[in-house]
Image (tube, rainbow, N blue to C red):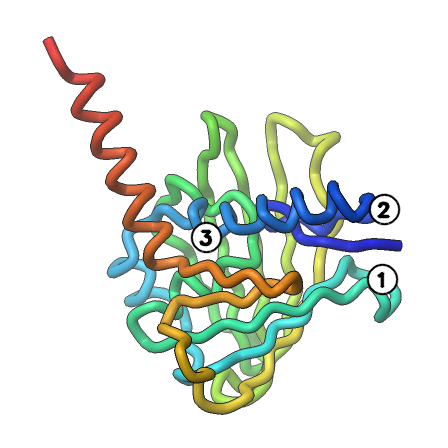
Amino acid sequence: MPTSIAGGHLVFGLSAAHSDASMKTFATLALAVVVNQAAWAQTLPTRKAGLWEVSIRPEGAADTAVLKVLQCTDRATDALTLMSIAPGQENCGKPGVARLKEKGHRIRTACHVHEQRVDTVMELKGDLMSRYEGRLETRYPSMVSQTPPPKVFEGRWLGECRAGMRPGDMLLPNGVTVNVVDDRRRAEERQDHHDHKGHKH
């Protein structure tokens, strides 16, 4: 059964054409991370710089449902790339981070997408310098019926970023590369333009 990532959601049973369209939609995942990067970078745990492979699947699903992305990161971009597997990270407040007893972190974000609140809880366990695993749960308080199933993920450090890759680059399963930093900058420019336009007299 074809599987793809669309806007941070795992999508199953798509035709090849729809799968490609949904994979393109995944490029908006980075666009959704419109946050104060500096504040997040100071708050969130930081992974080792370099190339990370992140495997994602619905909790309880078979290994055949796994999707993998490659993330090139450094200290300046990791706050964005770390959270990029979570949907709806747009217009967020400062994240809450708590230490877990078993060498890990629990990250909570409260964001708004099209005036709809999105609550996310991400748990990380392991070594952020080499290999970690975690669980991701997303809730839409105003749309409970559309709440996606929890996801589990695993990240492992592969080494230096590939030639030609820049920090913030994500290589998607279909071979398309997006950059969360560039997308965030463009999103902020559009938001600034919208805000200024809305305040014209």
Mark 3: amino acid: Ala
Residue sitting nearer the eye, 32 or 60: 32
Q: Which image quarter: residue 54? A: bottom right
The residue depicted at 65 percent of the width and 28 percent of the height is: 143
Q: Position of residue 62 (x, y in %)?
A: 88, 66
Q: Position of residue 22 (x, y in %)?
A: 66, 44
- In this view, 164 is above or below 85: below
Tell me which label, 2 or 3, sits earlier in the chain.
2
User: Is residue 117 toward the left or the right of residue 149 in the image?
Assistant: left
Tell me which label, 1 or 3, sits earlier in the chain.
3
Q: Position of residue 42 (x, y in %)?
A: 28, 67
User: Is residue 68 toward the left or the right of residue 83 in the image?
Assistant: right
- In this view, 199 is above or below 172: above
Q: Residue furthest top?
A: 201
Give the Cα distance between marks 2 and 3.
24 Å
Residue sitting nearer the eye, 150 or 3: 3
Disc 2 residue crowd, few under 14, some 14–19, many 20+, Cα 10 Å: few
> Dot 2 lies on which element?
loop
Disc 3 residue crowd, few under 14, some 14–19, many 20+, Cα 10 Å: many
Provide the residue designation for mark 1: 60
> Dot 1 lies on which element?
loop
Tag 1–tag 3 contact (CB < 8 Å):
no
Disc 1 residue crowd, few under 14, some 14–19, many 20+, Cα 10 Å: few
Tag 2–tag 3 contact (CB < 8 Å):
no
Tell me which label, 1 or 2, sits earlier in the chain.
2
On the rendered image, what quadrant is the C terminus found in? top left
Q: Position of residue 179 (x, y in %)?
A: 41, 60
Mark 2: amino acid: Gly
Provide the residue designation for mark 2: 13
- In this view, 30 is above or below 162: above
> Dot 3 lies on which element?
helix
